[in-house]
Image (cartoon, coloured by chain):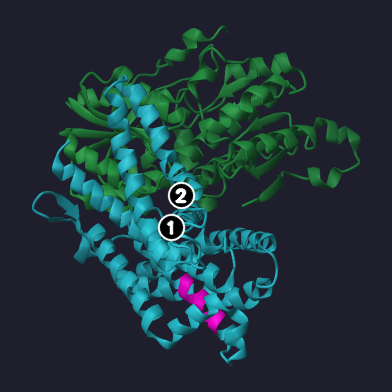
């Protein structure tokens, strides 16, 4: 469970003792989930991130990766170790919002930059926003708000909604309800990491709903979709892309076909950066990239773009360089709002089968390019 | 709340309980006969699921996969017993916990090296897809089959222990290890057989449940915790206790998740009731365990009463 992988890019490893070279090296600490039910997410973020670093070929960057095993206390320990003994300048990588809430506030308070490739809990976008915290993925509510909007467009008027009981789950249901205009047939919190959904599916069956909204990332989604298919309940599922992306689709199988979900990215997104990214990722790792891999890739390119114009030791200049976000995002358009969360377009996607493999394709747009999250209003930056 | 929903939830609870029984039977047997705490029991569950998924993908048959999962878990159990566990019988429980915890790490990492970090695909066999009409409610045919499997294994295990020579030796081993060794029973072989039997039951549970859950590294640990709750409630070392404890945990957990939010909704706001209900429901079985420990410190059916 405790896997430590240290990737030293370029020839930095050979320059021990050369103090000048050491001083110029930027250390990026990646705390992510590489074991357990959430491992697929962390592996994809890491692989996307590493792909961008390899393509950049910047020999002054040292990446240290450690597995948090999806445990907050482990993540806190790793963060301390990375700051104290690895002398990390920038931290990144956390997948789960409960871990981010445990780690990020203390990290940014120590004048370390934290760039999130995934988790975007609402407090960090609002009242607890911080000059050293950037989110290169999304604010948690975003994709769920888009799902609520899409539920309206699909004509659903009585949706049953369900998410795990942790910060991102609360954000998910709040986000969905913010845009959804119909009635709720029921509302449920499940346990994080829950594997059996029989009790929940029975309630969906009895609720008289016309559709189901779920937020169940990683293995939770696989378990739910498999059991849902066997239960004979035949209501359409609507979801955010987290529960229906490349990390879980092969394991879900045909049960996931046709599910409408939302995402800031899709493998078929038609821009040069993304076409190259999808091809390069497939060549490097032999599988299709997931939404998480795209976020890891964007996060690395954001950091690289800032390092090109500023030294990380000059915190104000580096912060401005991050804020400018002058990199080619796989999403096409990308900019930061004042709370350091993305302004971007959100797509509606559908799970389809292409050449025998399940994947997503874009079928519409939920929010246009100028979408930004609601919590920025509470951020004083 | 309709009767149909209530019955369906009850069936869900029983099904969950019976799968927990498969897990806890092996755990309690190993503890009862060898006095060994085996934290790596959840890893054997994972091995059963992974080999079932791999074999099912290769052959296209879930049933062949099930046999493969069962065999792989039993073989892994026997190998682990011979190479590691055998050295632990005379040590105290802390050493056993440390060594078997190390086994969890090794087996999880090993499975990840062989099968990769992403969950595997394993689906229900075609013949068991869909639902069956029980008159009052529709119920998943596969879950009903799981109930059947659980009952069949429970009966089989009872027959094995109560009616066969091996069963007599197992019971004798529980009562007095030195004496049956003195009587000329090869205690080493007996221990290996019991450990492999427990592993096979865990592997069977993993493979059966894997078809409706995510076959992923670390899938055994949450179940392992529940299995420990079951055997503490039932009385460590007692198969009957494991059965009763598993059914109690299964039904109470399922019903709690279903009824508690509804109960709080009668006097709280819906979203608040949902949060409080869900939080309390996840604690319910531990509250039950604490209660049992207060009233019957050795569990409901203590093996060495």
Mark 1 = which residue?
A: B300
Write down the colour of chain B: cyan
Quadrant where the image shows the N terminus of chain B: top left
Residue at point 14%, 50% (across, down): B138
Mark 2 = which residue?
A: B292
- Displayed quadrant of residue B207: bottom left
Could you say whether the residue bearing mark 1 is in a helix, strand or loop?
Answer: loop
* Residue A211 horizontal/vertical position (percent): 21, 34
Residue at point 15%, 34% (across, down): A208
**Residue A167 or B16: which is nearer the viewer?**
B16
Magenta-tinted stretch: B190-199
- Displayed quadrant of residue A242: top left
Residue at point 38%, 51% (across, down): B249
Q: Measured along the vertical axis of the image, is residue B104 above or below residue A19?
A: below
* Residue B195 horizontal/vertical position (percent): 52, 74
**Residue B87 or B49: which is nearer the viewer?**
B87
Residue B197 colored in magenta in the image = yes
Residue A380 appearing in the image: yes
Q: Is the residue under label 2 in contact with that under label 1 (CB below 8 Å)? A: yes
Write down the colour of chain A: green
């Amino acid at each position: 469970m405790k896997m430590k992988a240290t990737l030293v890019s370029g020839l930095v490893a050979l320059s021990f003792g050369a103090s000048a070279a050491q001083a110029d090296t930027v250390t990026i600490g990646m705390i992510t989930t590489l074991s357990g039910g959430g491992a697929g997410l962390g592996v994809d973020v890491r692989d996307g991130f590493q792909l961008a670093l390899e393509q950049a070929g910047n020999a002054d960057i040292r990446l240290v990766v450690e597995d948090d095993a999806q445990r907050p206390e482990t993540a806190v320990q790793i963060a301390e170790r990375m700051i104290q003994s690895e002398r990390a300048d920038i931290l990144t990588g956390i997948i789960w919002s409960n871990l981010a809430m445990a780690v990020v506030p203390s990290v940014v308070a120590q004048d370390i930059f934290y760039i999130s490739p995934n988790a975007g809990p609402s407090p960090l976008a609002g009242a607890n926003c911080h000059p050293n915290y950037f989110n290169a993925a999304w604010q948690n509510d975003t994709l769920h708000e888009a799902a609520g909007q899409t539920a309206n467009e699909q004509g659903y008027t009585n949706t049953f909604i369900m998410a795990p009981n942790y910060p991102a789950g609360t954000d998910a249901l709040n986000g969905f309800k913010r845009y959804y205009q119909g009635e709720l047939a029921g509302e449920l919190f499940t346990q994080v990491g829950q594997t059996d959904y029989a009790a929940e599916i029975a309630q969906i069956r009895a609720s008289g709903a016309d559709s189901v909204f779920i937020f169940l990332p990683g293995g939770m989604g696989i378990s739910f979709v498999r059991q849902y298919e066997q239960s004979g309940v035949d209501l359409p599922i609507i979801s955010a892309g987290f529960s229906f992306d490349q990390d879980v689709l092969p394991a879900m199988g045909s049960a996931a076909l046709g599910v409408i979900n939302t995402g800031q990215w899709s493998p078929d997104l038609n821009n040069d950066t993304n076409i190259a990214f999808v091809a390069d990722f497939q060549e490097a790792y032999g599988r299709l990239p997931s939404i998480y891999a795209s976020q890891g890739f964007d996060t690395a390119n954001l950091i690289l773009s800032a390092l090109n114009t500023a030294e990380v030791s000059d915190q104000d200049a580096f912060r401005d360089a991050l804020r400018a976000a002058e990199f080619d995002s796989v999403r096409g358009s990308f900019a930061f709002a004042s709370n350091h969360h993305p302004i971007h377009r959100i797509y509606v996607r559908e799970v389809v089968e292409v050449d025998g493999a399940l994947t997503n394709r874009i079928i519409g747009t939920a929010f246009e390019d100028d979408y930004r999250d609601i919590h920025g209003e509470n951020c004083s930056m | 709340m309709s009767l149909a929903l209530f019955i369906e939830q009850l069936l869900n609870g029983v099904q969950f309980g019976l799968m927990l029984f498969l897990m806890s039977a092996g755990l309690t047997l190993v503890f009862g006969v060898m006095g060994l705490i085996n934290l790596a029991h959840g890893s054997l569950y994972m091995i059963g699921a992974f080999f079932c998924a791999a074999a099912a993908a290769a052959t296209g048959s879930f049933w062949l996969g099930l046999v493969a999962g069962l065999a792989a878990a039993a073989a892994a159990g026997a190998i682990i017993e011979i190479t590691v566990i055998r050295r632990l019988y005379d040590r105290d429980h802390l050493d056993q916990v440390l060594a078997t915890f190390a086994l969890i790490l090794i087996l999880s990492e090993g499975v990840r090296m062989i099968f990769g970090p992403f969950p595997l695909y394993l689906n229900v066999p075609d013949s068991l897809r869909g639902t069956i009409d029980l008159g009052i409610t529709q119920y998943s045919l596969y879950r009903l089959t799981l109930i059947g499997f659980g009952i069949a294994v429970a009966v089989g295990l009872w027959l094995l222990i109560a009616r066969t020579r091996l069963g007599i030796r197992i019971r004798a081993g529980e009562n007095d290890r030195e004496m049956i060794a003195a009587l000329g029973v090869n205690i080493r072989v007996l221990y290996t057989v019991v450990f492999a039997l427990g592993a096979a039951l865990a592997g069977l549970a993993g493979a059966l449940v894997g078809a409706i859950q995510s076959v992923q590294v670390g899938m055994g640990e949450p179940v392992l915790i529940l299995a420990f709750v079951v055997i503490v409630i039932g009385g460590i070392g007692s198969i009957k206790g494991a059965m009763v404890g598993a059914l109690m945990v299964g039904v109470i957990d399922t019903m709690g998740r279903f009824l508690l939010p509804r109960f709080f909704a009668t006097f709280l706001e819906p979203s608040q009731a949902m949060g409080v209900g869900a939080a309390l429901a996840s604690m319910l079985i531990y509250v039950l365990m604490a209660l049992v420990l207060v009233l019957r410190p050795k569990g409901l059916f203590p093996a060495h009463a």
